[in-house]
Amino acid sequence: MKITDHKLQPGWRKPSPNHGGPLEGPTLLVMHYTVSGAGAKGVADYFASPAANASAHIVVGRDGDIRQVVPFNLKAWHAGKSVWRGRSNCNDYSIGIEIDNWGRLMRTADGQVRSATGKIVDPGQAVELTHRNESKPALWEVYGETQMKALVEVTRLILAAYPTITEIVGHDDIAPLRKSDPGPAFPMGRFTSLVGGRGDAPLLTRKVIASRLNARGGPGLEFDKLGVFTGGSLVEVVYDSPGPWAQVRGVIEGGGEVVAWVSDQFLA
């Protein structure tokens, strides 16, 4: 698989009419779930319809099938009303990936596990977890290994082709009051670890060795300060990017968990 003229080969198909203008220098990769059992082809066909009024750049099926419907140099309509690091309308600076997955499931009165559309789902494919933006547990469809392998492969290609991308987030990060995808069943830490070539290692916990460490909205001094990590506090490394900056998750001074970028030299 490769990217030629902003299109996956193989994987490119009939383009979706649902797109905006040029996408130049994307900085964000946004992960979604489809709430569907249609497979990559079925979702891609849906995005190819003007009536859908929505799209993503690519769709990754449960069987590893990958379909692209919007070139990477055009804006797809996947994020909706969204904000990241104080910047609104994430469609303007992001690439969107739809992962074929039912997302939230429910157990009905007959004892079956079902999707939001009522389709019966194998209970072995469901896990009970609490979404970080919610207070009560729910059932969610797991993401299979074949799908994850394909997702990692295509994500590595995208990051190599578009080095301006510095962060990988979920739809629930950029629209937390509206969206819950890719959901708590999506192994974001493992995914970013695999994408970065670190294998199945668990999230790395590191210690702040500066007395105070600025938490910034991006990998550089020019980005806004989101808060301060105090000396001795522990943070989880979300994305250990090449270079002097690391993306971490932790609790800043005064309380509150953030995902932020810090200078790697001040982490032990």
Image (tube, helix red, strand yellow):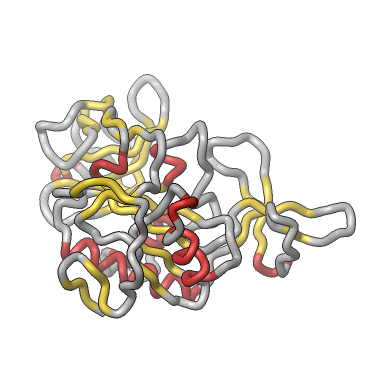
User: Horizontal and vertical percent for residue 233?
Assistant: 33, 35
| Above or below 212: residue 112 | below
- Which quarter of the image is occupied by the N terminus? bottom left
- In the image, 119 versus 219, the foreground residue is 119
Residue 81 lies, with reference to residue 235, above or below; the image says above
Q: Is residue 268 visible?
A: no
Image quadrant where residue 188 sits: bottom left
Viewed as shown, does residue 108 lie left or right of 35? right
Which residue lies most toward the top here? 254
Q: Which residue is found at the position 38% from the left and 55% from the top?
A: 56
The image quarter containing residue 196 is bottom left
| In front of the other: 42 or 263 | 42
Instruction: Single out the residue that lies furthest toward the front.
Output: 50
- Which residue is outermost to the right? 110
Q: Which residue occupies the foreground of this view, 210 or 96?
A: 96
Q: Nearer the viewer, residue 21 or 72?
A: 21
- Residue 74 visible (yes or no): yes
| Percent of width and height locating residue 66 | 39, 73
* Residue 30 horizontal/vertical position (percent): 36, 50
Residue at the image point whose x is 28% and y is 32% from the top: 85
Q: Position of residue 25 (x, y in %)?
A: 14, 49
The number of callouts visible is 0
Q: Residue at x 35, y 55 (%)?
A: 17
Q: Quadrant of residue 149?
A: bottom left
Q: In this picture, is 135 found above or below 58? A: above
State left or right for residue 104 relative to residue 258: right
